[in-house]
Amino acid sequence: MEEVTSSPASDESGPARRDRSNRSAALWATLVAVPVTLAVAGFTFAKLAPDTPAAAPSPSASAVRPQSTTPVDLPAPALAERPATVCRALVSQLPATVRDLAQRPVTAGAEQNAAYGDPALTVACGGTPPVVQPTDEVWSVNKVCWHAVQEADATVLTTVDRETPVRVRVPKQYEQPLQWVTPISDAVVASVPAAETAPSGCSA
């Protein structure tokens, strides 16, 4: 008698058929759910997105301010050999900007003078050291001692602890003058030797 057997692939009855029906139903549910989810997500994004593009951020306080690039008129007195050498070294070490003020050309003495911004903050190397009275205040900024004199339209700060004086004129438009000499102090330390003596108020 011939024996007849059936393979699992041809069995369409019982648990196998129910299992396939369940998988079919799950597949259809997934196909319906995906578009619905996408539609809901799109609607939510549209509601949360701003109606108009955000305004561009305003310039920061440190942004470079508009300024003239014309040469700044500065005197260039003749210097002895030693101060002239020191001043050339200083000018070579000065930064390209002082805070947000870009360097500008000068009319004379580029080897001893520099200028930044508009109105111009100026740096002059050489000349006569200031006379510091015992009651005068001196200020140490980045290891450089400065003596301040107030003028009508500026504060003039001069080094008093260096063998060659360096004078920085800070226009009154720039608040807190001592902050403006910070990068210049770094250049002074790098290029101008310390004096043998300094006012008692200057810290080491």
Image (cartoon, grey):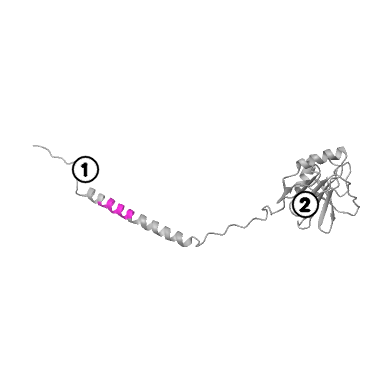
The residue that mark 1 highlights is 9
- Which of the 4 image quarters holds residue 155? bottom right
Q: Which residues are magenta?
A: 21-31
Type of residue at label 1?
Ala
Image location of residue 96, percent across then percent down: 72, 45
* Quadrant of the frame with the N terminus: top left
Q: Is residue 28 magenta?
A: yes
Mark nearer the viewer, 2 or 1:
2
Image location of residue 43, percent across then percent down: 42, 61
Q: CA distance from mark 2 to mark 1?
A: 92 Å
Image location of residue 153, percent across then percent down: 81, 58
Residue drawn at x 28%, y 50% is 23
First in sequence: mark 2 vs mark 1: 1
- Which of the 4 image quarters holds residue 171? bottom right
Q: Is residue 14 above or below residue 46?
A: above
What is the secondary structure assignment of the residue under circle 1? Answer: helix
Q: Is residue 192 visible?
A: no
Residue drawn at x 42%, y 58% is 42
Residue 194 relative to residue 95: left or right:
right
Image location of residue 170, percent across then percent down: 79, 53
Type of residue at label 2?
Leu
* Quadrant of the frame with the C terminus: top right
**Crowding near pointer 2: few (<14 within 10 Å), some, many (20+)?**
many
Residue drawn at x 36%, y 56% is 35
What is the secondary structure assignment of the residue under circle 2? Answer: strand
Q: How many marks?
A: 2
Judged by its main secondary structure, the magenta piece is helix
The residue that mark 2 highlights is 121
Q: Is residue 84 magenta?
A: no
Of residues 141 and 104, the one drawn nearer to the viewer in this rendering: 104
Q: Is residue 123 visible?
A: yes
